[in-house]
Image (tube, rainbow, N blue to C red):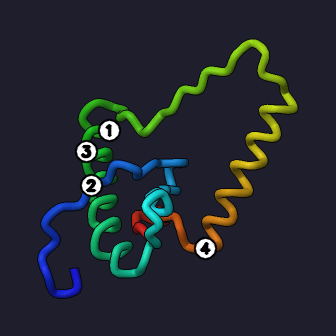
């Protein structure tokens, strides 16, 4: 990075929210998704993951794509679920505007 070799980078917090949207979770470390980090670290990594997923899908007909199962208790109300979804959409919208997410579009990672 910046002319020096990157020794190690741990992608522990990276999450796929949808097939086209990834959250690097850098805010947990009080870091921002700068252009250098986006282009030099995350874009090559995600391109490789996407290519591997496509290879697996062609070999096996389908590949695991980050499916997340959520279990809610019997007491979970519709209002509570709706409120949680609205909060999530608001957080994602705010993050999109702030440039905190990686977007996959037409085979490219932006």
Along the polypeptide, which appears first: circle 3 or circle 2? 2
Circle 3 residue? 55
Q: Earlier in the sequence, mark 1 or mark 4?
A: 1
Which residue appears at 40% of the width and 63% of the height? 107
- Tell me if label 3 and label 1 are in contact, CB under 8 Å: yes
Q: Is residue 38 above or below residue 83?
A: below
Residue at 13% x, 66% y is 7
Q: Which mark is residue 57?
A: 1
Instruction: Nearest to the eye among marks 4 and 3: give it.
Output: 4
Does 41 appear above or below 55? Answer: below
Q: Dividing the image into 4 quarters, which one contains the C terminus? A: bottom left
Percent across and percent down for residue 36 are: 34, 80
CA separation, marks 3 and 2?
Answer: 24 Å
Real-space CA distance between mark 4 and mark 3, rounded to the nearest whole angstrom: 33 Å
Residue position marked by numbered label 2 in the rendering: 10
Estimate how packed mark 4 is, as few (under 14), some (14 to 19) or many (20 or more) residues with alpha carbons within 10 Å: few
Q: Residues within 10 Å of mark 1 (few under 14, many from 20)?
A: some
Pick whichever of labels 4 and 2 is earlier in the sequence.
2
Which tag is nearer the camera, tag 3 or tag 2? Answer: 2
Q: Point out which mark residue 98 bears.
A: 4
In the picture, residue 75 is in which quadrant?
Answer: top right
Closer to the N terminus: mark 4 or mark 3?
3
- In the image, farthest residue toward the front: 30
How far apart marks 1 and 2 lie (CA) works out to: 26 Å
Q: Toward which corner of the image does residue 3 lie, by quadrant?
A: bottom left
């Amino acid at each position: 990075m910046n002319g020096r070799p990157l020794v190690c980078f741990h992608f522990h917090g990276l999450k796929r929210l949808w097939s086209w949207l990834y959250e690097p979770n850098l805010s947990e470390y009080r870091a921002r998704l700068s252009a250098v980090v986006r282009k030099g670290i995350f874009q090559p990594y995600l391109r490789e993951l996407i290519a591997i997923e496509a290879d697996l899908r062609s070999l096996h007909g389908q590949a695991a794509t980050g499916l997340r199962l959520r279990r809610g208790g019997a007491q979970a109300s519709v209002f509570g679920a709706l409120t949680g979804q609205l909060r999530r959409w608001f957080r994602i919208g705010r993050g999109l505007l702030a440039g905190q997410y990686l977007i996959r579009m037409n085979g490219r990672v932006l």
